[in-house]
Image (tube, helix red, strand yellow):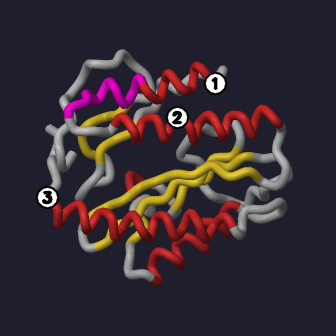
Amino acid sequence: MIIRKSGEEIRKMREAGRIVAGVLDMLEEHIRPGVKTETLDQLAEEYIRKRKGIPSFLGYRGFPASICTSINDVVVHGIPDKTRLKEGDIIGVDVGVILDGYQADAARTYAVGEVSPVARRLMEVTRASLEAGIAACRAGNRLGDVSHSIQRVVEEGGFSVVVQFVGHGIGRDMHEEPQIPNFGPPGRGPLLKPGM
């Protein structure tokens, strides 16, 4: 069941989201060749806790870190460790925060120094697909319209979507309904309504 949020609940989620965004902005200054992914994790946890947040991922289903760090071919949920970033890597960082009982979660992909033209293009197409998906998140559309918007941009950009993982709703819990695939036909799925 999709849980619709009140204005107050959305406000609380936005506050948690501001911390998530702050972590992602702060980490950009530290992502460079030679930095260990565990260092990024430590910096993120300090940032979150200093702002009275709780790292959502730490201990969630046994996850041992505050952020996910996924380098190059690692699609998602990479575990920070002693791995050092190298020139030309791309790294996806996923951050989740609990604040006042509500959660926010977001990821960003960074270039480590100079990356290949293909890696740069992948990052550009991925960003454009995110923007297309967000633009389709409107009351009156269906969830499939969001999924299809993402898939269309990715495939028109010469890439393919990962079908093994999906996005998700969020609120008091990290993973709430609905599941949000990055692929599928338009006009299908739940009707989007305010508060979803």
Alpha-carbon neighbours of circle 1 within 10 Å: few (<14), some, or many (≥20)? some
Task: Determine which residue is flagged by label 1.
Answer: 157
Task: Name the dominant secondary structure of the magenta segment.
Answer: helix
Is residue 154 within the magenta segment? no
Left or right of residue 33: residue 144: left
Check the image and report above or below for 126 versus 9: above
**Quick one: 176 or 109, which is closer to the camera?**
109
Q: Which residue is mark 2?
A: 129
Q: Of the residues shown, which amino acid type is indicated by label 3?
A: Ser
Binning the other alpha carbons within 10 Å of mark 2 as few (below 14), some (14 to 19) or many (20 upward) gives many
**What residue span does the magenta drawing correspond to?**
140-148
For residue 58, which quarter of the picture? bottom left
Residue at the image point whose x is 61% and y is 71% from the top: 26
Q: Residues within 10 Å of mark 3 (few under 14, many from 20)?
A: few
Quadrant of res 72: top right
Q: Position of residue 73 (x, y in %)?
A: 69, 36
Q: Vertically, is 81 above or below 30?
A: above
Look at the image and tell me in which quarter the N terminus lies: top left
Q: Residue 153: percent from the left, percent from the top?
A: 54, 26
Residue 88 — which label?
A: none
Q: Quadrant of residue 36?
A: bottom right
Q: Which residue is pictured at 25% across the width and 30% down the height?
A: 141
Give the total number of marks visible in the rendering. Answer: 3
Residue marked by disc 3: 6
Badge 1 or badge 2: first in the primary sequence = 2
